[in-house]
Image (cartoon, rainbow, N blue to C red):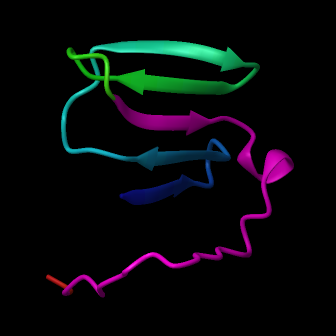
Amino acid sequence: MKLNYHPDTDSLYIDLSAKPSAESVEVSKGVVLDYDADGNLVGIDIDHASSKLNLRELVTSHIPLETAEKV
């Protein structure tokens, strides 16, 4: 999973899979769910993210995280 924040558009994309998006559905104003060809959720796009989320805090609970190696 990758979190990608774009400050120029104040949008947050939560990338859940490496599979490409085949369909997108807006579930509420400025929140779009992306699905692959098999109907699996692959990403979440949130417009105006700073007004909908606290972008200064990320809390995980009971998730086995590994640090990605820098390229």
Residue 38, position as x, y percentages in the image: 21, 17
Which residue in the rendered view is the most extreme toward the left? Answer: 71
Whether residue 23 appears in magenta in the rendering, the answer is no
Res. 65 image quadrant: bottom left
> How many callouts does the rendering have?
0
Instruction: Judge whether residue 61 is colored magenta.
Output: yes
Q: Residue 32: image x %, image y %?
A: 57, 24
Residue at 20% across, 44% down = 18
Q: Quadrant of the N terminus?
A: bottom left
* Residue located at (61% from left, 48% from top): 8
Q: Is residue 55 left or right of residue 70?
A: right
The percent position of residue 68, horizontal first and vertical second, equals 25, 82
Where's residue 59, x and y in %?
65, 76
Q: Which residue extends farthest right?
A: 51
Magenta segment, prevailing SS (helix, strand or loop): loop
Q: Nearer the viewer, residue 1 or 71?
A: 1
* Depicted 35 relative to depicted 51: above or below: above
Q: Quadrant of residue 35?
A: top left
Question: Residue at horizontal 64%, vertical 74%?
Answer: 58
Whether residue 19 sits left or right of residue 5 in the image: it is left
Name the image quarter holding residue 66: bottom left
- Give the vertical position of 23 relative to 2 (above or below): above
Quadrant of the snapshot with the C terminus: bottom left
Residue ID at (74%, 19%): 28
Magenta stretch: give its range.
41-69
Q: Is residue 48 above or below residue 6?
A: above
Q: Is residue 32 left or right of residue 63?
A: right
9 vs 40, nearest the viewer = 40
